[in-house]
Structures are given as structure tokens and as C-alpha cells.
Amino acid sequence: MYNPGMSAIFEILGKDAGGRIGRLRTPHGTVETPTVMPVINPNIQLIPPKEMRNFGAEILITNSYIIYRKEELRSVALEKGLHGLLDFDGPIMTDSGSFQLSVYGSVEVTNEEILEFQQKIGSDIIVPLDIPTPPDVHFRRAEEELAVTAERLEAARRLIQGEQLLAGPVQGSTYPELREKAASYLKDLHFEVYPLGAVVPLMEAYRYTELVDVIAASKRGLSPASPVHLFGAGHPMMFALAVALGCDLFDSAAYALYAKDGRYITVNGTYHVEKLNYLPCSCPVCSRYSADELRKADNREELLARHNLYATFAEIRLIKQCIKDGKLLELVEQRCRAHPKLLDGLKELYSHSPWLEQLDPATKGTFFYCGPESASRPEVLRFGKRLDRFNLEGSVIIRTTPVKGEKDYDQILIFKAPFGAFPAEMEEVYPFNAEVPKFPDYEALTTALSNTLKLIELNPQAEFTFICEKEFSHPLIDEINKKAKLVYREDWREE
Ligand SMILES: [Zn+2]
């Protein structure tokens, strides 16, 4: 029998957009998500695994294939267990050698062998030997490899049925339809964790548009109650975006690999330590060392790794706070301004607003308009879909701020971009209590004016007067002028 009751293993405590705060139960303890698993290289440990808790790590990940292949590691792992080998008593996930398979083309172990090995050494989350199909391959190859992966995952599900969690990686290359199909097939096999595989090449090439589509497609196929691991994602600058799409787990080899290269991670991108004159961070490392001292330190690699971990976990904590406050999308919009390719990813995220809208809580923290992309947020889309709920009759005035004589009208509507027109009584109600700039940008006006036009058309029995601001310049104003009485504010006279 597979582990019954997925909700017992993963519990969702809070939501915002597609993001959630969750609790994942493993044999070695419970983990709060979203979180990052620092990757532990069993051969070289720059920072002792048990120290990882000091940075905020609750779960680690290591590679069972590396341990399996090296006799001195394998014998210790079999004798003392994985937790004894790494000297860490919290949850540990193990990878299977799929990564090596993707790099070298072959591995010296079978799916069954590596599964049994992970089981024997006491891994908390076991990963089968799936085929990580890279981006851009021919559709037929992606489909064929997916079939092999499916067989191996079925075998894994039959084999692993105890307390240990089993991961079911979702593959399918850069074909959203294959990702969704694979995900919905795996959903019925009831894995405890769903890694999204082979996305590293997309992240390395800053292909965030496709990354967003891969995540969204996979999520659509899975149950929203399942935890999702974005395999290989370790840079904090894209965590908020991935969390907003519903990713719960990340893993970071980046903290160590970047340190080895002299690279210093921030949420806005990476600096080379040789080019840093100042340290824009206040973690224990950056508080103690100047940029110059850090550069020249004998243990530079270790210090950089420590800073990289602090920066990584600070972002996770901020993301969790934003979910609690209902402000995750504001954070995503800020983060995605760090790089134009991330901005493309943000636009792609909002192309999925109809889907996100179904996941997004109906009420949350005050909506902040952060830029033209905000006009496509799920909350704005939701308002547009519900315009037919308003029944308007008699004389209706639409204005931004109050105008003289408005009390003589049967109904007063407030015009606020990017939403449109809504009854004045709702002004303080979410999302209409939004904080927006005084002068809306073109995108906000487009959405607000087209919603207003739609509202006017839906209520032919009412007589509309639209008080327009002179700063509003948009072709849709002429359309409104054809269906309502349009008066510019400075021309408005009390009637
Ligand atoms: Zn620092």
C-alpha cells in the first residue's frame, strides 16, 4: 500500500496566489515549506551538515549515487545510516544519479538498486532513477523517455511503501502538454513529493518564460494538495516567482558552487567578489568583514558559502512573511525587476492569471500597484469576470474623487485603475482599497476603461455620466463617449 492520506504528509497552512506555507512530515521530522535544501556533497563538506540549521535549513539533500559508488562512503552509510554518515539528525532527501545520467549519458546502477540503497540507508525522501530529458529535444524523444520514466516510477511505487517518502519526478522537456500529461498520470500513483525535473538548463540560460510554462503545466496536472520540488533551483532571485506558481521545495548547490567561483549571491543577482567594493548585506559574515578582507581571506570560499546561505534563507523567510500578509505578488513584481528575463517570466506568470485566480484567496492584504504588470494580476481578472453581478438602474455617475452634485445621481461609482468602476460603498473593501498611483499607466487604463465600457454595455437601462480626468489619454475614452455622457473634470458644472 502507498502512504495513505497525502494530507497527513503535507498540510497547507497559508496561501497567496499559487504559493503556500506548508508542513511536510518526514521520518526525521517536520519541515516548513517553502524551503531550500542545501546540497551536501558527501565527498567535500565546506560547512558541516549539522551547522546548516544555523542558517535556517530544516532539510538537506545529498546524492545517493555518489555514496553508492564510493566504497568508503557506502560502507559507512550501510553501517551507520545516511544520518550517521552526514552527522545530521534532521530530514535528508537523496537524489538517485539522474543528474549524472543527464551529464554523462549513463550510470552504473539500476533503478531498483539505487531505490533499495536509498531505502536501506534511511533516506527521508527517495528519488527513482528517472530520465531527465533536456529542453528543446524532439517531441518524440521527450515522449519516449517519459514512457521509460513512467515505468521506473511505477516500479519505485511498488517497491517503496513504508514510512519513507517517495518522489515522483515530472519530466517532459519544454513541452507543456507532456509535462501536464506526465503530472496527471503520476498524480494517480500517489507520490509524496513531486520534483519538476530537468529545469536547470532553462534557469542557467535565463529562460524564465519557458520555466514558468513548465511549472504551470506540471502544477495543472498535479493535485494542488501535493508538495512540489523545483529540482536544481537554488538562486534566491527566482524563488518568489517559483513559489507564486506553487513550488514548495528548492535545493541549493549554488551556495557552494558559486562560492568556489568567488561569486556572492544577492536577491538582485550575483556579484563577483573581485568586483565588490562594498558588501550589501548584514549577515554575520558581511558584518564582520569588509569587501577587501573577504576577497583576501584564506577561507574566502567558506565565508562566501556562508554568506550565500544567509542570503538564500533570508529570502525564504521574507517569502513566507509575504504569503502570511497576502503580499507575495508584490514581492514577485519587485524581484522580477532584477533582470529583464525575469520580467519576461513575470509577464508569463500573469498570462496564467485565469488559473492563478482559482488558487488565489478571495481576500487578503491591500493590493499595491507596482507597475504595468500589476494590471494583469489575478485579482484584476477576477473583477473583470464578475462585472455581470452589478445591476445598475437610473442615473449613474462614474468619477475618481468626489465631484459636486454627485448626490443627485441614483448611484455613484468610483473609477479606479486597473479595476474600472465599482459602487462607492465598496471603496474600503478588498481589492478596491488598493494603493494605486495618482496617474494610472497605459496598461492600468486599458483594463479599467475596458471594464467600465463592459459595465456600461451590461446595463443599457441605466444612464451613465463619466467624469474623466484630463490626464487620462486612451483610445477607449472615445468608445465610452459613444455610450455615456463624458465630461472632463475641469468642464464639470454642478447641475
Ligand atoms: Zn552577507
Image (spheres, rainbow, N blue to C red):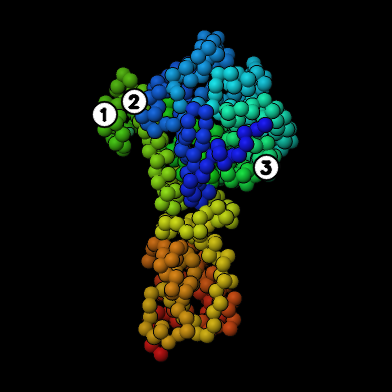
Q: Is residue 296 above or below residue 217?
A: above
Closest to the observer: 26 or 406?
Answer: 26
For mark 1, what is the residue? Answer: 289
Q: Amino acid at mark 3?
A: Ser
For mark 3, what is the residue? Answer: 184
The residue that appears at 38% across and 77% down in the rendered structure is: 402
The residue that appears at 55% across and 50% down in the rendered structure is: 348
Give the spatial CA distance, label 3 vs label 2: 43 Å
Closest to the observer: 460 or 3?
Answer: 3
For mark 2, what is the residue? Answer: 303
Q: Secondary structure at mark 3?
A: helix
Q: Is residue 470 above or below residue 123?
A: below
Q: Quadrant of residue 145?
A: top right
Residue 465 seen anywhere in this rendered image of the structure: no
User: Does any atom of ligand 1 lie closer than 8 Å to the CB of label 3?
Assistant: no
Q: Secondary structure at mark 2?
A: helix
